[in-house]
Amino acid sequence: MRTKAETLPHRAAGTWHRDCELVQVNGLLPDSELVFEKESDGGRWRATFKTIVGARLSSEECGDDALSSVLPVYGSMYVLKESPWVSELKKCGQPFCAHLQHFVLCFYDEMVEVAAEDMMLQELTM
């Protein structure tokens, strides 16, 4: 199994890994909400997830070394295809795990990984 990263083509995504600043994390499991600011255009965004099964938060410097070789240089939000983590989670056989995706969000100081069915992004007005 070879993990591949697909860049999420959304306006909320930064142009590079450290373009977005994580401002707030509200919960991790079962519901999570991330609020972040995009440095390149000053936008403020909220990311929420549908059917979260797992979440990991690490410092940007100490993020998973295996991921650093998979993630493209440009962008800040990705979906990993053929993710070993999601494959392990799916082994539980629960119906809600059938459509899990491995989302990776890179921020200035943090890397957030979420195993969920979907991610929704909403622009916030100040």
Image (spheres, helix red, strand yellow):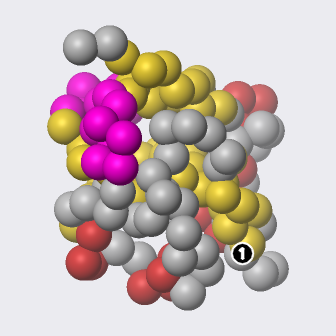
Residue lying at 34% horizontally and 73% vertically, measured from the top left: 63
Across and down, in percent, residue 16 comes to 45, 65
Quarter of the figure with residue 69? bottom right
In the shown orientation, is residue 91 left or right of residue 66? right
Q: Which residue is mark 1?
A: 3
Give left or right: position of 62 versus 96.
Answer: left
Residue 122 position in % (x across, y down): 48, 20
| Residue placed most toward the observer, 73 or 54 | 73
Which residue sits furthest top? 125
Q: Is residue 58 visible?
A: no
Q: Considering depth in this image, is 2 or 96 the residue closer to the camera?
A: 2
Left or right: where 71 falls relative to 19:
right
Q: Residues within 10 Å of mark 1 (few under 14, many from 20)?
A: some
Amino acid marked by disc 1 = Thr
Q: Is residue 14 magenta?
A: no
Q: Which residues are magenta?
A: 24-44
68 left or right of 71?
Answer: left
Name the image quarter holding the N terminus.
Answer: bottom right
Q: How many numbered marks appear?
A: 1
Q: Position of residue 90 (x, y in %)?
A: 71, 50
Residue at (36% x, 17% y) in the render: 124
Which residue extends farthest front? 41
Find numbered disc 1 in the image and state the secondary structure of the residue it sits on.
Answer: loop
- Of 55 and 42, nearer the camera is 42
Q: Is residue 42 magenta?
A: yes
Q: Nearer the viewer, residue 103 or 53?
A: 103
Q: For the C terminus, which image quadrant?
A: top left
Question: Where does the image place residue 46, in percent across and percent down from the top left?
Answer: 39, 25
In this rendering, the answer to whether 103 lies above or below 85 is above
The answer to whether one can see residue 117 in this image is yes
